[in-house]
Image: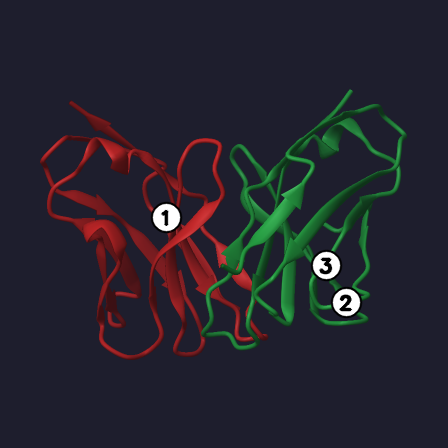
Chain colours: A red, B green
Amino acid sequence: AQSVTQLDSHVSVSEGTPVLLRCNYSSSYSPSLFWYVQHPNKGLQLLLKYTSAATLVKGINGFEAEFKKSETSFHLTKPSAHMSDAAEYFCVVSDLTRGKLIFGQGTELSVKP
Amino acid sequence: DAEITQSPRHKITETGRQVTLACHQTWNHNNMFWYRQDLGHGLRLIHYSYGVQDTNKGEVSDGYSVSRSNTEDLPLTLESAASSQTSVYFCASSYTSSYNEQFFGPGTRLTVL
């Protein structure tokens, strides 16, 4: 069965410094993996997705994630944090059964001026 | 532009009342999903549908029902609202396939008093 673990419930960075949000997954098959972002009182927006093509995936707003099969990881990074990046981030794995998603618990990103 | 909408955006009801939350998408997606989001639990799947007349239970389906009479709509009904069902509810849709991301609505905040 597929599962996903976000290793940090809260990450705090200063504006202009790098962001690293960690995610490990468990899957019996080659998974589809996603990162979603949720700003306060908003719905979820797709940041990026991995579907067995390039292992380094680029998303919106300067975010990217690298799929590492040997480490079963899919960490999200951004070189330089912006105040507008403050939000909750969800790592998600797709169940092979026709598109069901399995969500991590979320990582809240705070960005200090 | 295609979109997914939810109504109402906010609802306050009393214990024991029947409540229906609407979800409407214009993506022409086959798959539709209902989630609830609670602090400490991330997003949990309530019900989902892979097409007209198809409905399936998710991990937290007790006390909820759905019906799918057309492609665009998947209303969620709380048969007899309970305080434990106070939550934020998200509807999502996707194309068929485990590779496709889900598109989320803006959410409905439901309070059961």
Q: Name the residue that disc number 1 marks.
A: A6
Q: Residue B78, located in which quarter of the rendered image?
A: top right
- Element type where label 1 sits in the image: strand
Label 3 to label 1: alpha-carbon separation = 32 Å
Identify the chain of the residue marked 3, using the numbered disc in the image: B
Q: From the viewer's perspective, is A2 left or right of B11?
A: left
Identity of the amino acid at label 1? Gln
Q: Are marks 2 and 3 in contact (CB under 8 Å)?
A: yes
Nearer to the camera, B59 or B102: B102
- Element type where label 3 sits in the image: loop
Q: Which mark is residue A98?
A: none
Identity of the amino acid at label 2? Asn
Q: Name the residue that disc number 3 marks.
A: B73
Q: Residues within 10 Å of mark 1 (few under 14, many from 20)?
A: many
Q: From the viewer's perspective, is A48 left or right of A28?
A: left
Q: Are marks 2 and 1 on the same chain?
A: no
- Residue A108 seen in render: no
For the point 40% across and 37% down, the residue is: A39
Q: Name the residue that disc number 2 marks.
A: B70
